[in-house]
Structures are given as C-alpha cells and as structure tokens.
Image: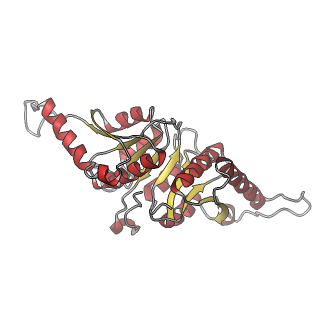
Amino acid sequence: MDSANGTAVVVGVDGSESALRAVRLAAAEANRRHRPLRVVHAFIWPLLRVPVDPVAGNPPGGGLRRQAERLVEQAVDVAREVDPGLPVTGEIVDGEASAVLLARSPTATTIVLGERGLGGFTALLVGSVAIQVATHAGCPVLVARGEEHPGAPVVLGVDGSAASRAAVEYAAAQASARGVRLRAVHAYTHPASHRPGDLQPMVYDEARLHDEEAGLLAASLAGLAERHPDVPVDAEPVHARPVAALVEASRRAQLVVVGGRGHGEFTGLLLGSVSHRVLHHSACPVAVVRTADPGRDGTGPAAAG
C-alpha cells in the first residue's frame, strides 16, 4: 500500500471524452499507487434551482439526475476496463465542480482531471476547473492532456525553490512506480544584460554560469539516489526558458511534473506562470505538486509522493 497521505485517487467526470481520458489515466494511477478510485460528478443543477427529477408523463429514466447517474456509471465501467480488479466507487455531489473537488483534495492521494470538459470555451487549451483545482488543491493534481509515451521518462522541472522540492519527491515516486528514468530539467537564462544605471553590458562567463546552475540542480536532487535507489536520474541543466524546455521535453515523456510556484513568481500567484503555461502546452499529462502556504489557505504542504 502506498504510504502517502490520502485514501483514494479522485477523478472528476462530466460526460466529456476528455473526462473519460482522465478516468483511464486515474485508473492506471490508482493501480500503481495501490489505492481505490473514486469517480466524482459535481451536480450543479440543484444550486441553480433547476428541476432534476423526471417530468410526469415523460418516459421513465429521464431527468437530469438520472443522466448524471448514467455518466458516472459509464466512467466506472471505463475504469474497470483498465483494471477489472480495481476498487472503484462513483458518487454524485451537489455543487460546483471546482468546489466539490477541492473539498475532497485534503484526503485524496491525487485528483485527476481532463484538460477541458463540457461547456469549456474552445479558445481555452485547459479548462477553468483544471486550472482552479491545480491552483488550490491540497494534493497533487494530474491533468490528462497530450499523449503518454510508453517507456519514456518522467520529466521533472526543477528551479531550486521550496515548491520544487515536493515535486522532486513526487516525480521520483512516479518514475519508480512506472519503472522508468527520471529526467530532471533545470532551465536557466543569462543574467540581466545591464545593471540599473550601467551603460556597459554585463560580462559573464558562460562556463561558470553553467557550472553554477548545475550545482543548483545537484543540490535540489541531493539524497534522491538514497531515497529512490531504483530510479536512474538524468540531471540536465539547460540554457533555455523554462516553459520552452519543459514543453520540448514533454514530447518524449510520459509525464511532466512541476511545482505549483517557483522562484521569481509574484507572491499573489498561487499557480506560477511556468506551471500554468506548461499545463496549457505540454504534449503529455502534467502533474502539479503545490506546496501550500498555511497562512494563505490553511491546507499545509501537499502530499509529496
């Protein structure tokens, strides 16, 4: 049994094909983590005072609530196709999707979502529910997008921040469970070309900069070999912008793992700009591992493994 906090993998469904992809991903995740799977549908209609029961005189089996029951039943069946022995339960909860899922996050091992559900604006690459849950959840959030590449490594974005430490542990655990390599990518750019007030451009040593960034990456991964001796780690300091480096790496990965907020992010942004943009552009599923600020939302650190 997985020792991480949380009792079940939770997947949100709304009847969309994107949600069914999330169910398949969640079932595989629950199998790897030796956890039960809970399929959750947020039923918003009662909050809007819309009648949900069958109308008198209409054929039996009608009504919005029965429709919700059917889509949950379908999702449970899809999960059991992935793993017939997996313990799966389904539930319908009155409420708005983000609120319903966030309420379950403190006791979930992972929340899994499709990249965009029914009713999402087509211009949005990732739906608002996925963004809101990834921003505020008290557990890792896994978003089913792009394609999983069997046998490919787990890619980890590292920036040396406290937020990335939880992501390091989560990514190593994922690589171990999947039996693949961990590719730790630390992207960096040149320092600012001018100091304030200087007329001449700064002069820096490219090799020294690379060595310094490689040292930061090594420090972020310190002790990982002892904690996860079965996981081969490729540490890659890359001279590139973080989003570009991670999106490129995602083309040859089965999962990209990012922290919720890293160095250089505005403190008012709970989900950092790098994590946000990787969620929108990754070519494979993305896990966001957020280290919560107890003073902000009281949820404490997110589960790391």
Q: Nearer the viewer, residue 37 or 288?
A: 37
Q: Nearer the viewer, residue 120 or 223?
A: 223
224 relative to 129 in the view: left or right: left
Q: Quadrant of the C terminus?
A: bottom left
Q: What x and y, as percent, mark residue 40?
A: 62, 59
Q: Is residue 191 visible?
A: no
- Residue pictured at 39% horizontal, 69% vertical: 298
Q: Nearer the viewer, residue 265 or 112?
A: 112
Q: Nearer the viewer, residue 3 or 129?
A: 3
Q: Is residue 21 visible?
A: yes
Q: What x and y, as percent, mark residue 11?
A: 58, 55
For residue 174, above or below residue 284: below
Residue 47, quarter of the rendered image: bottom right
Residue 182, quarter of the rendered image: top left
* Name of the residue lying farthest toward the right: 57
- Residue pictured at 89% horizontal, 64% vertical: 56
Q: How many marks?
A: 0
